[in-house]
Amino acid sequence: MLVGRDAEILALDRLVGGARIQQSGVLVVTGEPGIGKSTLLRNLADKAESVRILKADGVESESGLAFAGLHQLLLPLLDLLPALPGPQATALEVALALREGTAGDRFAVGAATLGLLSRCAEEEPLLLLVDDAHFFDHPSAEALVFASRRLMADPIAVVVATRPTTGTPVFDSDLPRLELEGLPPESVARLLADSANAPVAPDTVARVHRATAGNPLAVVELAEEVDAIDRLAPTTPLTVPDRLLGEFGRRVLALPARTRTALLIASIAEADAAVVGRALTELGTSIGDLTAAEEVGLVALSSGGITFRHPLVRSSAYGAASPAERRSAHLAVAHSQPQSDPDRRAWHLSETVIGVDEHVGGLLAEVGSRAAGRGAHSVAATAYERAAALSGSVRATAQRLLLAGEAAWLAGQLARAETLLEHASEVAPGSELGAAVDGVRGNLEMRAGSLDLAGTLLRRASLALAVTDPDAAAMLAADQINACFLLGATAEGLAAATRLEALLDSVTSTYVEVRGRMTIGMARVLAGEPGIELIRSAVEELEQGTWWSDDLRRPGWMVLGSLFLRESSTGRDLVDHVVQELRDRCALGTLPTLLFHVARDHATTDRWSSALAVYHEAVVLARESGQTTDLAMSLAGRAWLSAGWGRRTTAVATPTRPAHWPMDTALRWRVPGRCPRWETSPSGPGAPTRRSATSRRSSPCCRGSACLTSTCPRDQNGPKRWFGSVGRPRPGRSPPCIGPGRWRRGNRGRSRVRSAPWRCW
């Protein structure tokens, strides 16, 4: 997997392209272990055409065997030895142990190597790929450098990969060099997601990038530990497999014990010289003990503090310590933190605890609260989760797991949020707290699971809290109406609205009362009953204050009420304010659904360019956070908009993804499962009647908001017959339905189609 190496790939492709037109070229690819040298060479070999490839890999165990590397490289060409001048052939044969004799000088062996390569290239262009050249024996490396320097108009390309190890002929040579650096953060994000086969939170990406400096192999290894990384304290260094630490690890283990202790403290304290000094004093050592590490090139000491040569040095220092040594170091660093930084002190103390410690758990819960307040929801989730593990009571454990799940949701980490909430349900089943957990789980299912299950969980939670906490019960009833909206279940929505109306008599919060009023109005309108005035009055009241902004989980309804009115003035400032509020507070988990509604609103006006941009952002955020519901709706909305705009390529390339939504959300018989194609013809003013229909026989979810503009066959076996063909519409295919309620000539019987209600785009 090659990510973020476009420039390097282009340079190597040009080198091989030059060989095909009689232009020789040499490139030495250098970089630390795991940086991607071997991957680049493999990629080049896999796609190189019209060239003969010779390969050789340096082997550490053979680095002391003279000419072992050269023998490996030239073995396929030995049948050409008779074509070389006698002295050169003899020198090379003796060097490769093909005959007895006195070893020739280095010049003769190098000249023979060059001659053999040139003779081979007379028949077809030649590509030499030498990997791990730092392990090549010295004579072989010298011969390779000698020949590479003297390539003229030969159709030969030479690519040599080596570590930046001084004292080796290849690295010390003056051959053209391509230095591989670490991947940038955006490439690390892509590599992590591809390797983990799941979206990875931005905070986790940033942490992995800091720990690895973009080293691809280290990133891939850490991708297997993404869940564990999310749960690590921010103050704990990431550890990577020993095989990646290589030379750094060996140097650390060779240091005196006092120096290793000082290096461990520096790695934990993030090289803060003042904290390191106090912690080392507590452990009976000093910063002066770090000079031994400086002498071997692991750290640099200056008036500005302590600098690690590479982030992997920090991992090496931490990984080389025993668990007991780490706990002792964390305790010393915790005691050395200034009073102005209680968060770091709490994190370090949490690394010293074995078993339950309510005091430290309480400190971590405070850390979580402060982190959530500044928008660091991923950090808050970790703090609450660790606080739960240290809690001394079942209620405290469940409460903190609930808070951790909510924070993970807001951070866009839905899979993690699900796990935390399931654990909370197991800890406190059937209690009032358990009902609150069900409410959050229901909202999560709505965003990335089963809408049917979402409605069930929300209804159950609302009923459980109706007596003890009417405010929470009312909010959950409103959430249930949201699920009914997506399912197209008008009857269930009205029933929830009736229950919500009864609850409003007991609520104490203005926010709950206003939101409840708005939601009731929506449910009534969607069922064909009067409700616009309820929505309008609620929106006007929302515009008067910001007391609703503390509820980061439900901003979509604030916007949806304004958009529902379809008025040019009422609530428009509220829409902009809510979107900006969520951006400022980094509530990534709630942005996709909000952006979808905004994009849909723009798409129904003349702001199509803006709609396309907002749809795109919604798609990106929904995909990153794993919110399949919002991803499907946003992709479908973007496809509809592209079709209406006449952008056929974009329109037909999009629907393959929404087609898989039914499986992801555990729902059956959605419209895409019954439709052979999606309409992709322009549908703006003056265009033919849009063909939009759904089967009456489909379940309520088929008529929900996440239905593609579609043409549906009158077929009892719709899902079986059509699901395999929904991947991409075929141009020129005649649709069986040409308009709402009308069939093509030849279809017998009365049409069983009608326009889809509640279609969101």
Image (tube, grey):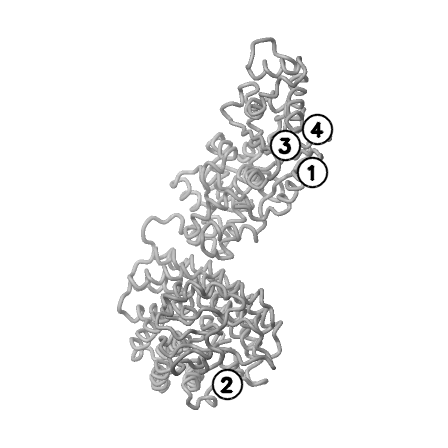
Q: Earlier in the sequence, mark 3 or mark 2?
A: 3
Label at residue 288: none
Q: Position of residue 616 (x, y in %)?
A: 56, 66
SS for tag 2? Answer: helix
Instruction: Tell me the distance, in whole angstroms, between the alpha carbons under discs 2 and 1.
Output: 71 Å
Q: Residues within 10 Å of mark 3 (few under 14, many from 20)?
A: many
Identify residue type, mark 3.
Answer: Leu
- Mark 2 vs 1, N-terminal side: 1
State how far apart marks 1 and 3 are (Cα): 11 Å
Residue 122 left/right relative to 56: right
| Residue 657, image x, y percentages | 47, 63
Quadrant in the rendering for residue 39: top right
Above or below, comparing residue 146 to residue 746 in the picture: above
- Using residue 753 as the reference point, say whether residue 44 is left or right of it: right
Residue farthest along the right direction in this orientation: 153
**What separation in Å lies between label 4 and label 3 (alpha carbons)?**
12 Å
Give the residue displayed 54% in from the left and 30% down from the top.
57
Looking at the rendered structure, which numbered label has been put on residue 151?
Answer: 4
The image shows residue 701 at horizontal and vertical percentages of 38, 74
Q: Is residue 636 left or right of residue 79?
A: left
Q: Which residue is mark 1?
A: 18
* Marked residue nearer the N-terminal end (4 or 2): 4
Q: Nearer the viewer, mark 4 or mark 2?
A: 4
Q: Which residue is mark 3?
A: 126
The earlier-in-sequence mark between 4 and 1 is 1
Residue nearest the viewer, comparing 677 with 373: 677
Task: Between residue 329 and residue 368, name the one nearer to us.
Answer: 368
Q: Are marks 3 and 2 in contact (CB under 8 Å)?
A: no
Q: Nearer the viewer, mark 3 or mark 2?
A: 3
The structure residue drawn at horizontal position 70% and vertical position 37%, both measured from the top left corner, is 21
